[in-house]
Image: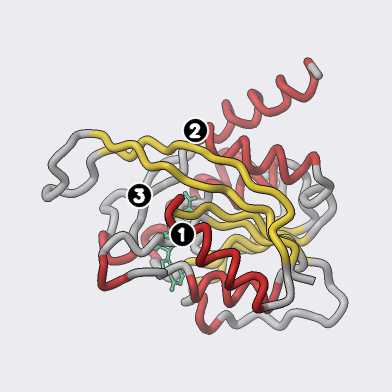
Amino acid sequence: MVEMASGKKNLELQLSKISDFENPDVRYEQYMTSAEVASTLVHMADMNGDIEGKIVVDLGAGTGMLAIGSALRNAKLVIGVERDENALSIAKKNARLIAPDTELSWVLADVECIPIEIGGDMQITGVMNPPFGAQRSNKHADRIFLEKMSEIASVSYSMHNQSSVEFIETFVEAKGGFISHSYSSVMILKKSQEFHSQSKKELQMEVHRIVWK
Ligand code: SAH
């Protein structure tokens, strides 16, 4: 028990060195997951046997938080997919600094058209903190990310707006999968845009482990 806790703390300490977005793009909902929230997710996934020795795909990898966390927990290979090249270049620097001896590949692409051929019986674990669709016009922006996960992953871990639990459940069931467990989490968002009125905001989230096939 003590060992497990210190393992998570150690991961959090390493992930706290990850650099954030330089000029977050509000259209893409670029918010870095905190080291605390990311280490909890990756640690839990690892305890469930879904990281070590597995191929892990991070959709919307940003500056690498979840991808690098998975690599540090001895994934066989981690592939981070991100469409913003500035974010990706920070992710690469972060990886060189924090996880130099791991197998990490970065793919500059939109998740809608990932140029990755996924072999038939390959077991892939997905991790993601997708755009939540915070703006009304952008509601359920996480749909396309879930759609992709359902195609490539056998199991995935993802964070969502607490209010979208029903939407996620319905979506996953329609794909023949199920949510095996969930937990609530809080993320503190720092002011990153001029139009944000508060300097900090608490975001209530739900983290789901989804079994797709
Ligand atoms: N996974 C990172 C970043 C989360 S923010 C972390 O946990 O810290 C969401 C990321 O998804 C942003 O970096 C954004 O640029 C990326 N993104 C949004 N829409 C995308 C799309 N259609 N294809 C690929 N990346 C996308």
| Quadrant that contains the C terminus | bottom right
Answer left or right for 56 relative to 62: right
Q: Label 1: which residue?
A: 164
Q: Is residue 183 left or right of residue 32?
A: right
Quick check: marks 1 and 2 in contact, CB under 8 Å?
no
| First of labels 1, 3 by sequence position | 3
Q: Residue 124 in the image: state x and y as whole percent.
A: 76, 66
Q: Which residue is mark 2?
A: 17
Q: Which residue in the protein does label 3 denote?
A: 21
Q: Residue at x 57, y 26 (%)?
A: 13
- On the image, the x and y values in percent for residue 27 come to 27, 66
Amino acid type for the residue under numbered disc 3: Phe
Q: Amino acid at mark 2?
A: Lys
SS for tag 1? Answer: helix
Residue contact between numbered discs 1 and 3, judged by CB atoms under 8 Å: no
Determine whether the residue tagged by mark 2 lies in a helix, strand or loop: loop
> Which of the numbered marks, if any, corresponds to residue 209?
none
- Amino acid type of the residue tagged 1 in the rendering: Ser
Residue furthest to the right in view is 121
Q: Is residue 30 visible?
A: yes
